[in-house]
Amino acid sequence: MILTVTLNPSVDKVFEVSGLSLGGLNRIGNTFTQPGGKGVNIAFMLRALGHEITAMGFAGDGPGRFIQNSLRDAGITTAFTLLPGKTRTNYALLDPQAGSLTELLSPGPEATPTDIAVLRSTFERLLGLADMVVIAGSLPPGVEPTFCAELVRLATSRGVRVAVNVREEIMNAALSARPFLAEPDLRDVTVYGDYDLSEHDGRLALARHVAKSAEIAVVNAGHEVICVSGEKSVSVKVPACGLLGRIRLDDALIAGVIDATTGGDVLEDLAREGVAAALAAASSPNGQFTSRDDIQSCLDRVEVTPDA
Amino acid sequence: MPDRKVVDIMTRDLTALTPETSLQQAAHLFSLMRISGLPVVDEQQRVIGFLSEADIIDAISPRSRDHSGIFLMDFGEIARKMRSASNAVVRDYMTEHPITVEESQDIGSVSEIMLTEHTKILPVVRDGVLIGIVNRADACSALMEDHWES
């Protein structure tokens, strides 16, 4: 069983607004609403690949119930710790005319020390059933980055592999607990610590830095993905994706890499499946692939290059 | 859809208590989840107990009966129960060896259990390990649907 941990899930509302005008009158075209948050997205996609998934994390009222019901409808077992506030709603505005994607992200309901204790207890309980843990996404108010590291440590101490896909501050804490797979969330980031992400060399240096603390490091800069394990590194140029594809590309990428790790650990294969999964998600109507066939059909578009 | 089984209506949720969970934390969960009870599991996720909201009420309710069966407030008892409940854990108040059902059981038999045992929630297990819960509202809905269809 793969246990996904989403500490700050969301309901994502996506609106298509052609010629978006800030301060002006805008008319909405297509719109859809779906459960979100990195860990939740990854849970759906791993489930689509046939994995047995238990999704946990914090969930508030209202939208939080929608998220849990949607997960269960997809055959995913849930074990969320409920919070008194409402789960956040995030908004994405797609402007096909300008080719832009505008995202508005809410902070989410606050978790108290009692809530955190309940979640920790649930996590420890479910670790006994888990083959792998995935911790992904932001933290709600009240939760410190060190808590993420604590979860990684609890899992690794029991021999359970952990994949983390989080932002810099949380990643730095998580790396201290030596996860199996680490992908920094680089959305809207051009500089990460001392690494300039505008250049290939900067991205490769970051991946090598992460790989000092994780068995596999993945760096996704949108148009290029770099995977490093030990001394070995590979790069993949990612073909251009549509607007919608940008929203969940990162989540699909790590879902693909995680899926590939269950079949082996050849770095080229992990990179190839990860990027194929991202491409498959990018070409789907809601930004998520729905079957293994979707990924298979994208594999021939992925060219993996070993780094010198 | 006649002959439906538990697997068709169960809620795939593993929210559960451990014997060491504080009663206060359990009450907090019941309130947030708007649920009347939760299974209690061991480290292997085997169901070893069940805690209902009635158990919590029993733990903290300041009451006693007089000879005619009328509940009387006893302020000494109130203070004692409040003190003991604040340190209480689920193990002290749960029902041990609770009734569980399996996913292959038909809904009619499960509804019968709910009626005779006056319970709203039953843990669903596979080889003793918790895999979800089935609640009375879902069982009732399924029975009614089957009835109208037939």
Image: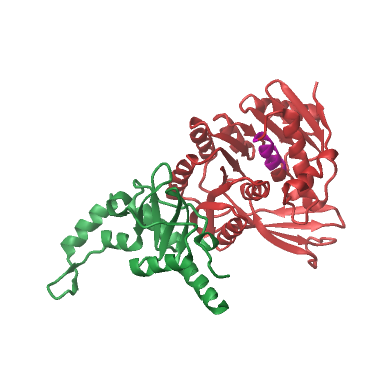
Chain colours: A red, B green
The residue lying at 76 percent from left, 54 percent from top is A102
Is residue B89 at all visible to an observer of this figure?
no
The residue lying at 55 percent from left, 70 percent from top is B2
The residue lying at 85 percent from left, 40 percent from top is A301
> Measured along the vertical axis of the image, is residue A122 above or below residue A156?
below
Is residue B18 at all visible to an observer of this figure?
yes
Is A258 covered by the magenta stretch?
yes
Quadrant of the rendering where the N terminus of chain A is positioned? top right
**Closer to the camera in the image, A269 or B110:** B110
Q: Main secondary structure of the magenta part?
A: helix
x and y, in percent, of residue B8 in the image: 55, 62
Quadrant of the rendering where the C terminus of chain A is positioned? top right
The reply, left or right, for residue A108 in relation to residue B29 is right
The quarter of the picture where residue A197 lies is: top right
x and y, in percent, of residue A143 in the image: 52, 45
The residue segment tinted magenta is A253-262
The quarter of the picture where residue B76 lies is: bottom left
Looking at this view, name the residue that lies furthest to the right: A97
Is A256 covered by the magenta stretch?
yes
x and y, in percent, of residue B24 in the image: 35, 54
The reply, left or right, for residue A122 in relation to residue B85 is right
> Measured along the vertical axis of the image, is residue A76 above or below residue A175?
below
The residue lying at 70 percent from left, 33 percent from top is A218
The reply, left or right, for residue B62 in relation to residue B109 is left
**Closer to the camera in the image, B99 or A239:** B99
The quarter of the picture where residue A273 lies is: top right
> Measured along the vertical axis of the image, is residue A252 above or below residue B142?
above
